[in-house]
Image (spheres, rainbow, N blue to C red):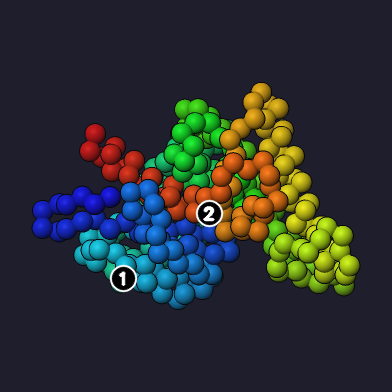
Amino acid sequence: MNQQVGDLGPLSMVVIDVGNTSTAIARWIDGDIEDVQRAQTHDHAAVIQSLDRVRETCENQQRQALIIASVVPNATENLCDHIEGELDLRPFVVGQNTPLPVDVEVEDPAQIGVDRACTAAAAFEHTGHACTVIDVGSAITIDVIDDEGVFKGGTIMPGLHLQAKALADHTAQLPLIEDFPPKSVIGKSTDEAIRGGIFFGACGAIRGVVEEIASVENRWPQVVLTGGGSEALKDHLDFVDSWVPDLCLIGVGIAYIKRAMEMRG
Protein backbone atom coordinates (compact mmCIF):
# COMPACT_ATOMS: atom_id res chain seq x y z
CA MET A 1 0.00 0.00 0.00
CA ASN A 2 1.84 3.06 -1.22
CA GLN A 3 -0.66 5.85 -1.00
CA GLN A 4 0.53 9.44 -0.81
CA VAL A 5 -1.30 11.86 1.50
CA GLY A 6 -0.22 15.48 1.25
CA ASP A 7 3.45 15.86 2.11
CA LEU A 8 3.48 12.98 4.58
CA GLY A 9 4.70 10.45 2.03
CA PRO A 10 3.78 6.78 1.68
CA LEU A 11 2.08 4.85 4.43
CA SER A 12 4.20 2.05 5.89
CA MET A 13 2.28 -0.91 7.30
CA VAL A 14 3.78 -3.02 10.08
CA VAL A 15 1.83 -6.17 10.96
CA ILE A 16 2.20 -8.00 14.26
CA ASP A 17 1.02 -11.50 15.19
CA VAL A 18 1.25 -12.06 18.96
CA GLY A 19 1.02 -15.79 19.63
CA ASN A 20 1.17 -17.75 22.86
CA THR A 21 4.79 -18.72 22.25
CA SER A 22 6.25 -16.26 19.75
CA THR A 23 5.51 -12.88 18.22
CA ALA A 24 6.06 -12.29 14.50
CA ILE A 25 6.48 -8.78 13.10
CA ALA A 26 6.87 -7.81 9.45
CA ARG A 27 6.24 -5.22 6.76
CA TRP A 28 3.03 -5.66 4.74
CA ILE A 29 3.44 -4.51 1.14
CA ASP A 30 0.51 -5.01 -1.23
CA GLY A 31 -0.35 -8.38 0.29
CA ASP A 32 3.23 -9.60 0.60
CA ILE A 33 5.21 -10.01 3.82
CA GLU A 34 8.82 -8.84 4.08
CA ASP A 35 11.53 -8.46 6.74
CA VAL A 36 9.93 -10.88 9.22
CA GLN A 37 11.28 -10.72 12.75
CA ARG A 38 10.36 -13.12 15.55
CA ALA A 39 10.76 -13.00 19.33
CA GLN A 40 9.46 -14.91 22.32
CA THR A 41 6.18 -13.33 23.36
CA HIS A 42 7.08 -13.36 27.06
CA ASP A 43 10.27 -11.35 26.34
CA HIS A 44 8.85 -7.85 25.96
CA ALA A 45 12.27 -6.27 25.37
CA ALA A 46 13.01 -8.68 22.52
CA VAL A 47 9.59 -7.98 20.98
CA ILE A 48 10.28 -4.24 21.07
CA GLN A 49 13.71 -4.77 19.51
CA SER A 50 12.10 -6.80 16.71
CA LEU A 51 9.53 -4.05 16.18
CA ASP A 52 12.29 -1.45 15.96
CA ARG A 53 14.19 -3.51 13.39
CA VAL A 54 11.12 -3.85 11.18
CA ARG A 55 10.24 -0.16 11.49
CA GLU A 56 13.76 0.75 10.40
CA THR A 57 13.19 -1.05 7.09
CA CYS A 58 10.03 0.96 6.36
CA GLU A 59 9.99 3.77 3.82
CA ASN A 60 8.41 6.30 6.14
CA GLN A 61 9.24 6.57 9.83
CA GLN A 62 6.77 9.43 10.31
CA ARG A 63 3.68 7.78 8.88
CA GLN A 64 3.21 4.17 9.90
CA ALA A 65 0.25 1.94 10.63
CA LEU A 66 0.99 -0.69 13.27
CA ILE A 67 -1.63 -3.44 13.22
CA ILE A 68 -1.79 -6.15 15.87
CA ALA A 69 -3.52 -9.52 16.04
CA SER A 70 -3.02 -11.07 19.46
CA VAL A 71 -4.22 -13.98 21.56
CA VAL A 72 -2.25 -12.82 24.63
CA PRO A 73 -4.04 -9.90 26.36
CA ASN A 74 -1.16 -8.87 28.65
CA ALA A 75 1.31 -8.82 25.77
CA THR A 76 -1.14 -6.78 23.72
CA GLU A 77 -1.50 -4.21 26.48
CA ASN A 78 2.28 -3.89 26.92
CA LEU A 79 2.81 -3.52 23.19
CA CYS A 80 0.07 -0.91 22.83
CA ASP A 81 1.46 1.06 25.78
CA HIS A 82 4.85 1.14 24.06
CA ILE A 83 3.44 2.15 20.68
CA GLU A 84 1.33 4.95 22.16
CA GLY A 85 3.75 6.14 24.82
CA GLU A 86 7.15 5.76 23.17
CA LEU A 87 6.39 5.89 19.44
CA ASP A 88 3.48 8.35 19.65
CA LEU A 89 1.49 6.22 17.19
CA ARG A 90 -1.97 4.72 17.40
CA PRO A 91 -2.00 0.90 17.44
CA PHE A 92 -4.71 -0.83 15.42
CA VAL A 93 -5.81 -4.00 17.22
CA VAL A 94 -7.82 -6.57 15.28
CA GLY A 95 -10.99 -7.41 17.18
CA GLN A 96 -10.91 -4.13 19.10
CA ASN A 97 -10.58 -0.93 17.07
CA THR A 98 -10.18 -2.89 13.84
CA PRO A 99 -12.90 -5.40 12.81
CA LEU A 100 -12.16 -9.02 11.96
CA PRO A 101 -11.21 -9.37 8.29
CA VAL A 102 -13.81 -12.10 7.66
CA ASP A 103 -17.46 -12.72 8.38
CA VAL A 104 -17.87 -15.54 10.88
CA GLU A 105 -20.70 -18.04 11.16
CA VAL A 106 -20.25 -19.56 14.61
CA GLU A 107 -22.20 -19.66 17.89
CA ASP A 108 -20.21 -16.89 19.60
CA PRO A 109 -18.09 -14.77 17.23
CA ALA A 110 -16.42 -13.03 20.19
CA GLN A 111 -14.72 -16.31 21.13
CA ILE A 112 -13.01 -16.77 17.78
CA GLY A 113 -9.30 -16.11 18.11
CA VAL A 114 -8.29 -13.16 15.97
CA ASP A 115 -5.34 -15.19 14.69
CA ARG A 116 -7.76 -17.78 13.25
CA ALA A 117 -9.85 -15.04 11.63
CA CYS A 118 -6.81 -13.35 10.08
CA THR A 119 -5.42 -16.66 8.85
CA ALA A 120 -8.79 -17.56 7.33
CA ALA A 121 -9.00 -14.22 5.52
CA ALA A 122 -5.54 -14.68 4.04
CA ALA A 123 -6.24 -18.31 3.06
CA PHE A 124 -9.35 -17.22 1.16
CA GLU A 125 -7.37 -14.42 -0.50
CA HIS A 126 -4.74 -16.99 -1.47
CA THR A 127 -7.14 -19.56 -2.93
CA GLY A 128 -10.01 -17.38 -4.12
CA HIS A 129 -12.59 -19.95 -3.05
CA ALA A 130 -13.58 -22.38 -0.31
CA CYS A 131 -10.66 -23.98 1.49
CA THR A 132 -9.44 -25.62 4.65
CA VAL A 133 -6.51 -24.00 6.42
CA ILE A 134 -4.19 -25.80 8.84
CA ASP A 135 -2.28 -23.51 11.22
CA VAL A 136 0.51 -25.16 13.20
CA GLY A 137 1.65 -23.30 16.29
CA SER A 138 1.27 -23.74 20.05
CA ALA A 139 -2.06 -25.22 19.01
CA ILE A 140 -2.97 -26.79 15.68
CA THR A 141 -6.13 -25.30 14.24
CA ILE A 142 -7.95 -26.61 11.18
CA ASP A 143 -10.58 -24.19 9.92
CA VAL A 144 -13.10 -24.07 7.08
CA ILE A 145 -13.82 -21.09 4.82
CA ASP A 146 -16.70 -21.27 2.34
CA ASP A 147 -16.93 -19.97 -1.24
CA GLU A 148 -18.10 -16.58 0.02
CA GLY A 149 -15.08 -16.20 2.26
CA VAL A 150 -17.08 -16.83 5.45
CA PHE A 151 -15.34 -18.48 8.40
CA LYS A 152 -17.44 -21.55 9.23
CA GLY A 153 -15.54 -22.91 12.24
CA GLY A 154 -13.11 -25.76 12.72
CA THR A 155 -11.07 -27.76 15.21
CA ILE A 156 -8.33 -27.06 17.76
CA MET A 157 -5.79 -29.57 19.08
CA PRO A 158 -2.52 -29.25 21.02
CA GLY A 159 0.57 -28.44 18.99
CA LEU A 160 3.70 -30.59 18.94
CA HIS A 161 5.55 -28.76 21.69
CA LEU A 162 2.48 -28.51 23.89
CA GLN A 163 2.00 -32.27 23.60
CA ALA A 164 5.66 -32.84 24.44
CA LYS A 165 5.44 -30.58 27.49
CA ALA A 166 2.29 -32.27 28.76
CA LEU A 167 3.95 -35.68 28.45
CA ALA A 168 7.06 -34.53 30.31
CA ASP A 169 5.10 -32.67 33.00
CA HIS A 170 2.75 -35.53 33.80
CA THR A 171 5.15 -38.48 33.83
CA ALA A 172 7.97 -39.33 36.21
CA GLN A 173 10.72 -40.29 33.77
CA LEU A 174 9.85 -39.20 30.24
CA PRO A 175 12.07 -36.37 28.94
CA LEU A 176 10.96 -33.13 27.32
CA ILE A 177 11.35 -33.30 23.53
CA GLU A 178 11.91 -29.97 21.81
CA ASP A 179 12.88 -30.78 18.21
CA PHE A 180 10.96 -32.38 15.35
CA PRO A 181 10.60 -34.33 13.06
CA PRO A 182 11.90 -37.75 14.15
CA LYS A 183 14.32 -39.91 12.20
CA SER A 184 11.78 -42.72 11.93
CA VAL A 185 8.37 -43.74 13.16
CA ILE A 186 10.07 -46.72 14.80
CA GLY A 187 11.94 -45.10 17.67
CA LYS A 188 15.13 -46.80 18.83
CA SER A 189 15.27 -44.77 22.05
CA THR A 190 12.78 -43.23 24.45
CA ASP A 191 13.47 -39.79 22.98
CA GLU A 192 12.84 -40.99 19.42
CA ALA A 193 9.75 -42.95 20.47
CA ILE A 194 8.23 -39.79 21.99
CA ARG A 195 9.31 -37.67 19.03
CA GLY A 196 7.79 -40.13 16.57
CA GLY A 197 4.61 -40.64 18.55
CA ILE A 198 3.87 -36.93 18.81
CA PHE A 199 4.91 -36.06 15.26
CA PHE A 200 3.27 -38.86 13.32
CA GLY A 201 0.30 -38.80 15.69
CA ALA A 202 -0.23 -35.14 14.79
CA CYS A 203 0.10 -35.89 11.08
CA GLY A 204 -2.50 -38.64 11.38
CA ALA A 205 -4.84 -36.45 13.41
CA ILE A 206 -4.61 -33.63 10.88
CA ARG A 207 -5.31 -36.02 8.00
CA GLY A 208 -8.27 -37.48 9.88
CA VAL A 209 -9.80 -34.07 10.55
CA VAL A 210 -9.37 -32.92 6.94
CA GLU A 211 -10.95 -36.16 5.67
CA GLU A 212 -13.87 -35.71 8.07
CA ILE A 213 -14.33 -32.11 6.86
CA ALA A 214 -14.39 -33.39 3.27
CA SER A 215 -17.04 -35.94 4.24
CA VAL A 216 -19.22 -33.30 5.91
CA GLU A 217 -18.78 -30.80 3.05
CA ASN A 218 -19.24 -33.49 0.36
CA ARG A 219 -16.12 -32.37 -1.48
CA TRP A 220 -12.39 -32.48 -0.97
CA PRO A 221 -11.24 -28.99 0.03
CA GLN A 222 -8.21 -27.11 -1.20
CA VAL A 223 -5.88 -27.36 1.78
CA VAL A 224 -3.50 -24.59 2.84
CA LEU A 225 -0.81 -25.10 5.48
CA THR A 226 0.64 -22.28 7.57
CA GLY A 227 2.07 -21.37 10.96
CA GLY A 228 5.41 -21.22 12.73
CA GLY A 229 5.56 -25.00 13.22
CA SER A 230 4.33 -25.93 9.76
CA GLU A 231 7.69 -26.40 8.02
CA ALA A 232 8.46 -29.57 9.99
CA LEU A 233 5.15 -31.10 8.90
CA LYS A 234 4.81 -29.97 5.29
CA ASP A 235 6.69 -32.87 3.70
CA HIS A 236 4.59 -35.40 5.63
CA LEU A 237 1.15 -34.08 4.65
CA ASP A 238 0.79 -35.14 1.01
CA PHE A 239 -2.80 -33.84 0.80
CA VAL A 240 -1.75 -30.21 1.37
CA ASP A 241 -2.05 -28.07 -1.78
CA SER A 242 0.03 -25.08 -0.72
CA TRP A 243 2.31 -23.98 2.09
CA VAL A 244 2.22 -20.27 3.02
CA PRO A 245 4.11 -19.84 6.32
CA ASP A 246 2.89 -16.37 7.33
CA LEU A 247 -0.82 -16.33 6.47
CA CYS A 248 -1.77 -14.73 9.78
CA LEU A 249 0.52 -11.73 9.14
CA ILE A 250 -0.97 -11.36 5.67
CA GLY A 251 -4.44 -11.47 7.22
CA VAL A 252 -3.53 -8.76 9.72
CA GLY A 253 -2.77 -6.47 6.79
CA ILE A 254 -6.04 -7.46 5.11
CA ALA A 255 -7.90 -6.46 8.30
CA TYR A 256 -6.41 -2.97 8.18
CA ILE A 257 -7.09 -2.54 4.45
CA LYS A 258 -10.73 -3.58 4.91
CA ARG A 259 -11.08 -1.16 7.81
CA ALA A 260 -9.64 1.67 5.70
CA MET A 261 -12.01 0.87 2.84
CA GLU A 262 -15.02 0.82 5.18
CA MET A 263 -13.99 4.18 6.65
CA ARG A 264 -13.83 5.69 3.15
CA GLY A 265 -17.11 4.13 2.04
Residue for badge 2: 245
The amino acid at mark 1 is Glu
**Tag on residue 139?**
none
Instruction: Name which residue lies at 58% across and 35% down.
Output: 222
The residue type indicated by label 2 comes to Pro
Q: Nearer the viewer, residue 192 or 113?
A: 192
Q: Is residue 36 left or right of residue 138?
A: left
Residue at 68% of width from left, 26% of height from top?
Answer: 216
Measuring from the top left, give residue 76's x and y in whole percent.
45, 61
Residue located beneath label 1 in the image: 56
Q: In front: mark 1 or mark 2?
A: 2
The one of 147 and 232 positioned closer to us in this rendering? 232
- Label 2 environment density (alpha carbons within 10 Å; few <14, some 14–19, many ≥20): some
Residue 139 location, x and y as percent? 64, 53
**Quarter-wise, where is residue 40 in the image?**
bottom right
Give the side of residue 63 with respect to residue 30, left or right: left
Label 1 environment density (alpha carbons within 10 Å; few <14, some 14–19, many ≥20): few
Indicate whether 118 appears above or below 89: above
Q: Are marks 1 and 2 in contact (CB under 8 Å)?
A: no
Sequence order check, earlier mark of 1 and 2: 1
From the top left corner, tell me how far across and down residue 89 is, in percent: 27, 62
SS class, disc 2: loop
User: Within the image, what quadrant is residue 160 found in?
Assistant: bottom right
Question: Taking 223 as reference, is 43 left or right?
Answer: left
Mark 1 to mark 2 CA distance (whole Å): 23 Å
